[in-house]
Structure formats: C-alpha cells, structure tokens
Image: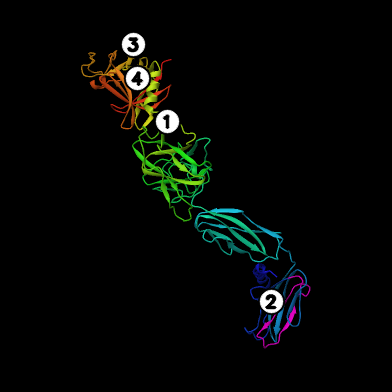
Amino acid sequence: MNKSIFSIVCFLSFVLFAGCDNYERKGTVTSDITANVPSLTLFVGESEQLKGNPADLTFAWQSEDPEIATVSSSGMVTAVSEGNTFIVCSSGDMSIRIPLTSLVKIPLTGFELNVAEISVNPNGRTMVVPVREPANANDVSLPVWRSLNTDIATVDYKGEITGRGVGLTEVECTINGITRSVSVEVWLTKPFKGPHLLTATEPYTLLAINFDFGGQNNAFWDSNSGNDGGNNYRANNGDPNGGPVDIGGDLAVGWTSSGEWLVYTLEVQDAGDYYISLDAAVNGSSRYRIELLEGEHQSNVWSNWTNVTGPITIPPTGGWSNWAWLDVENPVWFPVGEQKIRFYFESAAFNFRGLKFTHSDLFVPPADPVEESTEILANVQNWKLGPWTAMRNPDNRGEVWWPFLNPGDTGGSALAITDDVFTFNANGSFTHENNGDSYMNEELGNLFPDGNPDDSFVTEHYTPPADASWEVSVIDGKLILTINKGFFGYAVSPGDLVKTQYVISDYSETSIKLVLFSGWDGWCFELVPVN
C-alpha cells in the first residue's frame, strides 16, 4: 500500500507520544536488540511482519492495545481499528517499543494542480502544489514530477519549476496513477498593457511607457538604476522591475542616453508594410533606430536583432515639451503573429512619447509642407498676430518671458501690433497694413529717430515697399517663411528691413506659429485669420 508520505508524520507523532526514549530497558541494556522497522503505519485490516535483531535471539511479541492492533507470537502485526499503540518486542531482560499507527483508509479519488499555467523568466522559479480530492485522502503515493522539455523548464521532486530557455512546454505530476499537467511559458519579455494589435483597418499608437515586462537587460537597458522622472507608472500597473526607465509627469520616456533601448511585443493581425511615426520632443538633433527580432528565439540573452530602419535623425522640435510627430520615410514589413521590436537610442537625448503604426493600405503620403503651408498662407485673405506672440523661453515655449507690451504700458495688458494686418498674396507679394500707433520697433541708430535717446523703443508706421515679397522653403531641414523687405514685430538691425526669416513650427488654417530664424529664437509670433 502507498502510505509512505504518512510514515514520517506518524513516526514523529509517536516520538512525542512515547517521549524522547522509545525503549523500555529492563536489566542489562544492550544496543544489539532492534526491530526491522523503527515504526509502523497500517490501514485497518492490513498486516505486516516484524522481525527482531539479532536473529539468533528468541523474541516475544505483545501489543499494548489489542483493540487497535494485534501481534502474533511470530511478530505478525494486524491493524484492527483506528488509533495509536505500541508493539513490544522483548528477549530476556531487554525490550523495545515500536510505535504503530492504525488508519482507516480514505482513497484518493483525484487531484488537481493549484495552477493551470505559469510564466517565468529564465532562472525564475515557481512552486506548483497538488490539491487532493478529497482533501483528507491518506492512501496517496508521493508525487512524481516530469518536464516534457528540460531545455525550457525543469522540475524537482517538490514541484518547484525553474525556467531554463525561452519557449513553451508542460510539466506533469503523477499521483496514484493519475496525471495532471501545467503549461509553462519561459519568456525574456511579454507585453505590458497588451495586446498591441497591428491591423490594416486602423492605425495603432503604441505608448512609449508601455514597453514589455522583463526588467533590465531583457525588456530595456537603462544606463542608471534611478528613476529621474520620479513617475511610478510602471510599478502602479504591476511591473516591479520597470523603475530604472525614466518616466516624467507627462507620461513620456525622458532623460534618455545614447545606447539605451526598449523592447515592445506587437501582435500583427495583418501582414504588410507599416509606416511608422515617432512622437518626440527634441532640443537638439538626435538619432534612433528600430530593430526587429528575427526567427524563433530560444536563448536566454537577446540576439538576432535586425536593424529595419537604419539610423533616423530627429530634427529639433523647439524644446523638451514641444512635441511633434516625425515620420519614418520608408515602411517596415511585419509578418503575421507575435513580433518583437527594439527601440534603440543611437544619439540621445530626446523625449519619447510614442510610435504610430499605419498599414500601407491606410497610409496617405503627407503633403509637401512647403506647398501646404504656402497654400494656407495665400488662401487666407488677411492675417493678424495671435495670442502665442511673445518673447518665450527657447527651451520651454510654454514659458513667456515678455508678452510684447507697448512701451510705457503700466497696466501690463496692452499687446503691441495686434491691430496690424498682413497679407500673403498668391503672386508672392506681401503687404502690411498699419492701424495706428501699434507697430513698434527697437531704435536702429538714427533710422527711426524720435528725439529720445533714453528709450530704445519707437513707434513707427512702417509700410513695406511695393516690391515686398514672401516665400516658404526648406533651409537646413527646417520649414522657413522668408519675407523680403518686411517683418513682424521688431526690426533690430537695418538688415531686417531687407529680409526676415521665421521657422514655421506648426501650421493649420487657423494658426501658424513662427520662431525667428534670422535672429535670436526667443522671438515667437502667431498668425491667425482676421475675422
């Protein structure tokens, strides 16, 4: 009978029952008298033969409670009813007491494992426990554990499973001829907030902060262990190992350094070419690449990454909080199924907020920015300066240093030049209508003398000449509005009366934001339609 897992427990129980010494010694004590077993556990109705040692002696046998167990003169013990007693073996003046437990058999009808599936990292460990049916079953053999693929996971005699290599396998447990199994997945990373589904029906935006579970060296590599952003987004969403990635209050990955990387698991429903756009804020020129994991991954370290984009340069967006979507020129092919990508910071720093994947069936090539902005400027009959017009912090356009107050204004409310009207004609001519004493310029030597040498501001109704013109072009990778013989706001040198240039940082039919290109980039202007 299978009673081995109860024997140890019963033996310890009878040790307590019998005291620290199991032997009753009479007369001369000898260490030579022993029994063939130190203790005995039987089901009611079962028998077992006891033998005394040494074999050349004659032994007498006696049960201390025959109602629980009987013993024959030859040492054959039979369990009669449930309970505990001792079988006494004696020879001459020596004797030994053998603890006995008699049990009513409760058959095992079945069992289940406490989990149906587990997932672990390589070298990660998880304990699996058999749950008996019924819970008090005592006719139970020791569990026998077996992994169906020891290259992926191993299991010890206690049911502790250890991940070995990336993949999927099963671990079996057999008790009393009944076998149950648990599915074991060993992974380096797995999706966080997934699935991240790529389809041909709609674009998908993947947040940068939703990189995979897996921790340092698996799901990411970060050059320092601290969280410079101080945001606990990862820990608050079930990832205790994502802390080293620096996440700011704007829920973007920041404080990035060259050589760092992030891994994302995608679920591709529709194979095909996908155009990728990057949501980033960059103070200076930076560079990144995207890599795709090729083939079945079976090792415990990352390998087989293929650079599928090449190095991609990110132009400055105007500050750490000035976000812009930047398109990757060429699409990336993704096959159906689970795909892993690695976002690699080649030359940082820049703030990273997300990636957008658009299937080629949905992709509409972006309009040429020169043609599009030129058309918008010409189609609106008249423009005026809007509320974004101000002197602003170049590193944080949200911070206003000076809101273009009129000289001598004490109320802090009067905005300069807000009544002037600007027209960008389709034939390339530019007109500027001054409406009263609202256009002001810094003093240009004796260009605009006003007789006040202490005040650097003068009011002047400057009207551009008839041959004033405008155009939009790309210079040094930036979209530039050039006005020949005209300007907005201030003329700070005689050259500004010849030509001024502005970076078009954002444009639509209702607002065009400009940053001075031909001078200090703290000067910011906004054009809005005149109602």
Mark 3–mark 4 distance (CA, rounded to whole Å): 16 Å
Per the rendering, the mark at residue 405 is 4
Considering the image in quadrants, where does the N terminus appear? bottom right
Q: Earlier in the sequence, mark 2 or mark 3?
A: 2
**Circle 3 sits on which residue?**
436
Q: Find numbered disc 2 in the image and state the secondary structure of the residue it sits on.
A: strand
**Circle 2 sits on which residue?**
98
Magenta residues span 43-68
Mark 4–mark 1 distance (CA, rounded to whole Å): 39 Å
Question: In the picture provided, is 516 more to the left or to the right than 82?
Answer: left
Residue reaching furthest left? 446
Residue 147 picture quarter: bottom right
Mark 3–mark 1 distance (CA, rounded to whole Å): 41 Å
Closer to the eye: label 3 or 4: 3
Q: Nearer the viewer, residue 7 or 500?
A: 500
Q: Amino acid at mark 3?
A: Gly
Q: Nearer the viewer, residue 29 or 299?
A: 299
Q: Earlier in the sequence, mark 3 or mark 4?
A: 4
Q: Amino acid at mark 1?
A: Pro
Residue 408 picture quarter: top left
The colouring scheme, among rainbow, by chain, secondary structure or one colour, is rainbow
Q: Nearer the viewer, residue 100 or 20?
A: 100
Per the rendering, the mark at residue 366 is 1
Q: Amino acid at mark 4?
A: Leu
